[in-house]
Image (cartoon, helix red, strand yellow):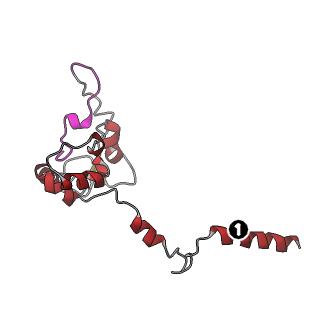
Amino acid sequence: MTFAVVIALFLGVRYLLVPKSFGEYGHYRGLALAENADRPLHYSTSANCARCHEDIFGDKSKGHHAGLSCEGCHGPAGKHVLFSDSTHTIKLADSLILKRDSTRQFCAVCHEKNAARIKILFDTINKSVVKVVEEKKHNHLFDKETHKLLNCIECHNPHDP
């Protein structure tokens, strides 16, 4: 009797929690694609960036970061692109300006030692691998006025490092 009650409760809760479109296409929710397609886009493409930022895009396409998306460093650019396409005469609102993280920690996300990532410790023509910077060996560059450790982009152009 108790077993039958537990099964009945389980089936009742399952009926309430499982979406109606579940199982239409095998073990998937049938409306998942339509629901995702209806969500607003936050991202753009590097091709959209190149339309207004040709000089920067040209430098980047020749540099070691050529294979990276602009949004990988600058963040989602969907609204930025939509606004800049609609007008070129009005200054962008602060909320539409793409800010990048210029800290050493941000660059280290890709450039730190990581045993699982293909890397090199020297210059190469092959742009498919990540140059590893040993942070402890690169910690000797301080600003002469503030005496603070310099961020990577203060010496390296991130578009053509």
Q: Which residue is mark 1?
A: 13
- Secondary structure at numbered mark 1: helix
Quadrant for residue 7, please give it.
bottom right
Q: Is residue 152 magenta?
A: yes
Main SS, magenta residues: loop
Q: Residue at x 28, y 40 (%)?
A: 94
Please indicate whether residue 79 sits to the left or right of residue 66 in the image: right
* Residue 139 coordinates in the image, percent (x, y): 29, 30
Q: Residue at x 87, y 70 (%)?
A: 2
* Up/down of 145 relative to 80, above or below: above
Comparing 88 with 21, the one in front is 88
Q: Furthest-top residue in view?
A: 145
Q: Give the quadrant of the C terminus.
A: top left
* Residue 116 coordinates in the image, percent (x, y): 40, 54
Please indicate whether residue 107 sits to the left or right of residue 153 in the image: right
Quadrant for residue 33, please give it.
bottom left
* Up/down of 68 relative to 90, above or below: below
Dot 1 alpha-carbon crowd within 10 angstroms: few under 14, some 14 to 19, many 20 or more: few
Q: Give the quadrant of the N terminus.
A: bottom right
Q: Over which residues does the magenta segment extend?
A: 144-161
Residue 62 seen in the figure: no
Comparing 65 with 30, the one in front is 30
